[in-house]
Image (cartoon, rainbow, N blue to C red):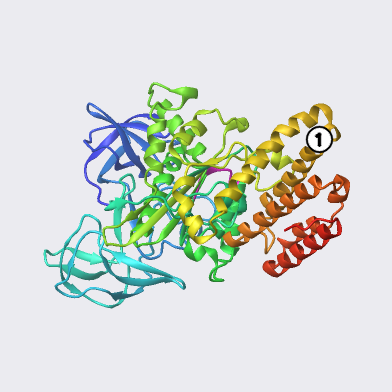
Amino acid sequence: MMKTAKGEIYRVAGPVVTVTGIRPRMYDVVFVGHLNLMGEVIQIRNDKSVIQVYEDTSGVKPGEPVTASGSPLMVELGPGLLTSIYDGIQRPLPVLNKKMGDFISRGLSEPGLDRSKKWKFESAVKKGSKVVGGSILGAVQETKNTEHRILVPPTTSGTIEDIADGKFCVEEPIGHLTDGTVLSLMHRWPMRVPRPVIDKLMPDIPLITGQRICDTLFPVAKGGTACIPGGFGTGKTVMQHQLAKWSDAEIVVYIGCGERGNEMTEVLTEFPKLKDPRTGAPLMERTVLIANTSNMPVAAREASVYTGITIAEYYRDMGYGVSLMADSTSRWAEAMREISSRLEEMPGEEGYPAYLSAKLAAFYERSGRAHLLNGKEGSITIIGAVSPAGADFSEPITQNTLRMVKVFWALDSKLAQRRHFPAINWLTSYSLYMNTLEPWFDREVSTDWKMLRMKTMELLQKEAELSEIVQLVGSDSLPEHDQLTLEIARYIREIFLQQHAYHEVDSYCSIQKQYSLLRTIHEYGAACYDALEKGVLLTDIFKMKSSGLLAKAKFELDFDHELEKVVAEMKKEFKSLGVEAM
């Protein structure tokens, strides 16, 4: 990065530094003090510029030199992003760890991409080919199962003068345009500027997560947005791990934004060990990790979200489906609040800046399934975790996020305390993608999928109403029909909604398996109601052993075969009660 004009420090207020003597543009990168701490211009007041510094400013004093770079903060995009672990401003943490151990020295900077590694490039264009921004020049095999498509930068176009196959470092020229523009394996893009697309598509294809409560009751579309709010211990991080591992996205970008150090350590140690269920290779081979813990400078935390979404857009532009996990946007908002207070801006609700809603909207709007500049189709699905203080969903971050996203997976502390996981509350959660996704489920799963889902939600709602009466008068005071309703709802909760994240079979549930399991529970429930109407005693219905077999079947590797045996046993037991059912 070029360093140009020089100035000096006028005032220091934590990560916010006021300087004089330079005339930068908004969001230009500036190097502050004798340590060359990297910062970004966030305000210009007459002859003074206000910088947010991405590193600790302890010991920095007025009068120290300041150097303007003349360009905004850029993200390096090219081969080598996958398997990488970066901090909030794309410094590779493993490289820094080798140089200085566990603590990063201030002012140190390393390029985001390895400059020495050579990549085997195979071109897909020839001399004389016309290319535009986003055109695919060729490909590099980045990991065993992921092809990295080399793109023309979005703002570049022209005619190929020459291009070569071979092994290149990321900065070496692989070709030229007729106007002299040099083409290489990498290019840079300003992190706060969304990468362009031709147009966005309707969210009519679901992101299959393998989690029953998500896929069946509250599905998210590819290119959609979802929010996972929950208090401490409700399973936000485990839920995001499950979504990263099992969802049918091809690339995963995980942003640990301001999380506790022990949680981030768990992510950094566990992710490399996870196996990709589709290929058997390590999950890290299709993952980029952005690690920014709560003890790191708040300014870098604010930047980490933009670093992650820019990398996600880059892989989307190759034609991939990308899943971006932001854990958590609450810490990002807290960083904005701290910087805003140091700028002496007028505070909004609970001290957050008045532009909080606009910032959240700008982030979530960078999601979507789109037609790309190169004619391909790609998507970014954003799943943001929110950590409301005291699990209070009425606080500003949750409420502003709910205005932007279309799926709300509300984690419930009471469910977590009862060891019901995923602890998603089915009464307060929702998905606004149902209407656009219905044709896909009718076509790919079954025409009665919508009916099953509606019956499930009605049954769970009825259970909630009856539970309030039970707390007053006890379950034995209820009519037998209502007692049976409570029992069938319990089957749905314990057999269908509960899912074991660490069980080798139950951790993932295919959409067809979800449908078969839910249909069988409802068919069993209908047979129970039929038996009750024909005079069978409720105690005899509750004594049936086949319902317990259904609970075990979901853990079996050969689920279809086990389900057939369970259904046969159910029919046999109902027949013994004098009822022809199922």
How far across and how far down the image is residue 154, in percent?
Answer: 25, 56
Asked whether 490 or 149 is in front, the reply is 490
Identified by mark 1, the residue type is Pro
Position in image of residue 315 (x %, y %): 38, 59
272 lies above or below 6: below
Q: In the displayed structure, does residue 445 sit left or right of residue 9?
A: right
| Residue 228: image location, x then y, percent | 55, 42
Give the residues in magenta: 255-261
Q: Residues within 10 Å of mark 1 (few under 14, many from 20)?
A: few
The foreground one among 374 and 125 is 374
**Up-down: is 163 above or below 188?**
below
- Residue 95 visible: yes
Q: Is residue 501 magenta?
A: no
Q: Where 58 sits versus 576, above or below?
A: above
The residue beneath circle 1 is 479
Nearer the observer, 370 or 417:
370
Please tell me whether the stretch drawn in magenta is mainly helix, strand or loop.
Answer: strand
For the question of whether residue 264 can be seen, the reply is no
Q: Quadrant of the C terminus?
A: bottom right
Q: Residue at x 37, y 36 (%)?
A: 52
Report the side of 267 relative to 152 (left or right): right
Residue at screen point 17% across, 71% down: 129
> Residue at (56%, 56%) from the top-left corner?
268
